[in-house]
Structures are given as structure tokens and as C-alpha cells.
Image: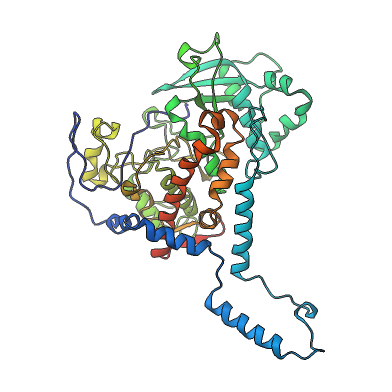
Amino acid sequence: MSQPAGNRVGTKGKTRAEPRLGGRHPIKTFPERDNGSEKMKGATKHLRESDRVCKEQQAVKRPSGVLKEQRHVSKELAERRPNDPTPADRKEPAPKHEAAVRKEEKAVCRDDQRQDLPDGDLRKIRSSPDTPWLSDDDLQKMELLASGEVVSKARVPAHGQVLQAALDPGSFQKQNGAKTSSRELNKHQTTQHALPRRVAPENHSERCRRGGCSLLKRPDDWYEVLAFHLDRVLGLNRALPAVLRTFPQSDVLPYRYTNGAPRPVVWWDPNIQHLDDRDNDQNSVPLSWLQYQELLRMHCGKEAELTAAPCVGVNHSEWGRLALFDFLLQVNDRLDRCCCGFRPDPEESCVENLLYAKCRNDKELVLVHILVRKTDPSRMVFIDNAGRPHQPADNLNFRLVEGIDEYPEQAVSLLRSGCLEGRLLRSLYSDREFWEGHGGAPGLRPLVRTLEQRGRILLEHIRDRRLRLNRDL
């Protein structure tokens, strides 16, 4: 069964306000449904106000209660007699206040911004202790994707623009020599899948079952590489490793894959569970929009059994991870394939394929790319993550966060801290071809700041609705 990575529904817009007309297929306007999305749209109206709030959250300020406490301490120090014990003499040191913690975070962010990213490092994958969010397993798979030799290929059914390619790690293991020992390269055998080693001739399917395959995506899907690094920096750890790569002339690959255009290469996970239905193999479970909204209210895994209808075996906390990730990237081809939550351009495939017309009836809407692993069916896997890097702030898709009542605390804290830009740039630097192909830090900074802007809008949405943050995510 093939791992989905197919045609992505395009989306360059926000919620279903009055659509722009033009092109071959004018967009019809559907009556608004009272699903709360209009209230959520308000989060985008005052970006300057959102910026001010974000800066106030990042500023080193003491809460009023802390200021009163400190004035009390100052008075106590002024009146203290010479023989009184000082704070250092006391057995229990005073706890750090929130302001002090924020001050430390701000200093760390400044260190992130000043991090040296030298152009002289010519390694394809530039691993560093400064990117602890990239695990050894991630780096090993990135090495395989960036340097492995293509030894066989196969078409992916129903996905004509994607090619499955088996990669031989032997070539880059020899190139690395003493830099990377075979023990280090195969260290992740104790985790998910060992990099394949040449022991005996294998066919393509056997290579893929051993974790040695990849998906060669379209050049336009380069944003999927940035999505992988965003996933790791935020601490979500649900996306599959991805790199940007060009391929030399090959006896295995067709010419369009070796014409010099860099394209994203994503690790193929043989552990992903697919439905037996060949026409619906882009899901581990079939799920309609109405069932999805119902299971969100049930809090599956907390207040309801994972296997009790309408639950589908996925923990409630996973949907908060997914919503945050998809909103920042504006990935609609998962929760909103029909483009119901924004104004799509007339040339978008969801309009040309008449999917947009289904928005008038929630009963016709289904979710796609809802995937889990066979060995861990309560946790999701995020695939096909090439969202919309240039989606304008006044046309963001708030349907992606509809029904979500809690978000992962670690990711939200990073968005609040102001550290996202420095850490994400440092992470992207590890992929030399991606880094250099997008102009290094100057070229990538606008993309990262767009993500930060969307993050501020999401933070305002979370704050205004007093949504929960989950520490257990």
C-alpha cells in the first residue's frame, strides 16, 4: 500500500468571505453557517494590536503582585538590623519570578540571533550541538535522503507527480569515512528503523520495508522541508524527515528528476497504517468533518475511551498539535480539502475540481491525510505539509482551528518567547542545499517572520478564548 503524498489542493486565501471572481470558474458564494468561524476571523483584524500584546508578553515586566512583594522586600531590607540573616543565609532561596524567567528566555533568544552560521561548512547535512531538537535519528535519515544513491524506484498509485525511490546509504558512509562511524550511522536501530545495510541483493519492496525509501516530491513542494524543521523546533515531532536535493544523471531516475531542479525528498515510513480501500489510502481512518467535530467534544483518551464511537483511536491532544502546525503553515489539504475556510483563487484545484461547491453541506466534507503508525495508533504522523508560505494575513484559514480547545504548551511558549526566528534559521542551516538555495538567512528571514506573524494571531485567538495549554503533549 502506498504512502500518500499526492496532489495538493492549492489555497491562497482566508475564511469564506466574498470570493474574488475571475478565471474560468467563478466562485459561488455560500450562505454562512453559524459555526463560530466569524468570531475567529476577528483575530486577524488588528495585527498591530496583536504585535503590541506579543511584545508585552515578551517584555521583562513584573506582575503587580510581584512589584508589591518586591516593595515589601525593599522595605524589609531597609529596616533590617545588622545581625539579621540576609536572603542568602536563609534556608529556602526565593523562587524565580516569571519576569526573571522571561528575562533569561530573552537572553537565550539573543544568543540564538547571534549564532554564527558559517558559509564555509560544506557538509550536506551540517549537524551541530546547537540544534538539540534534531535527534540522532533525524540526522541519520537526513544524511540518507541528502546523499544516498538511488538504486531503484516505483510509482506511487494515484500520485503521478511523486516517485518512490530506494536509497543506498553505502555511498555516503564511505564518503564520510572517519567522520561518521558505522556504529553511529546505525545507532538508531534501537529506535524506529535502521538504515539499510548491504548484506544481500534486495528488491525494491524489501528496501522500503527496511526503511530505506523516500518520496521525491515536486520542486514546488519545497515548503515541506521548512515544515519539517518547524515541527522539530516547536517540539511536536510528528512530521517525517525531509531535505532539499538535486540528483545527478542516473540510469534509474527519469530526466525530469535529474535536470538540476532541487526538489524535496521525504523519508518513507513503512510503519504508517493505510486503509485497505485503494481509493482512500490517504487515511489510516475514515473521518468526516462532522465526526471530527464530535470527537473533539468527546475528549477521546481523557473523558472517553479511544475506541468508543465517535473516537478513532487518536488521543485528544493530537488534534491541538495538528491544528497549531497546520495554522502556522496554512496547510488546508488535511482538515479543509474543499477550501471552505478562506477565499480560494479561481485557479485553485479545489475550485476547478468543484470541491469548493461542497462547502454548502457539512455532511459532504471529509478529512484526508489523517495517518498513524501501526505500532503507535494513538499518535498522528504529519505528511504532505507543504502549506502556503505567502498566504496573506487577512485571508488565513481559521477553519483549521475550529473546535480545538487546547494546545501544546511547549509550542505556544516558544511562539510567545520570540525565539522562533533564531532557532528555525539555525535548524534550516543544517540542510545546506535548502539554506543556500533560498539565499541563507536574508532570504529565509521573511518566510520565518510570516510564521511569527501567524503565531501572534494564533496567540491572540488562544488568549481571547482562554483556551487551555496542555503540558502533557
Q: In which quarter of the image is residue 119?
A: top right
Residue ID at (54%, 57%): 417
Percent across and percent down for residue 413 are 54, 57
Q: Is residue 301 in sight in this rendering? A: yes
Horizontal placement of 217 versus 60: left or right? left
How many discs appear? 0
Horizontal placement of 63 versus 285: left or right? right
Residue ID at (78%, 77%): 88
Q: In this view, does 51 lie above or below 195?
A: below
Query: What kind of colouring is applied to the model shown?
Result: rainbow
Which residue is nearer to you in this view: 277 or 187?
187
Percent across and percent down for residue 270 are 55, 30
Which residue is nearer to you in this view: 132 or 332?
132
Q: Quadrant of residue 353?
A: top left
Residue ID at (66%, 45%): 132
Q: In this view, does 102 lie above or below 434?
A: below
Which residue is nearer to you in this view: 420 or 214?
420
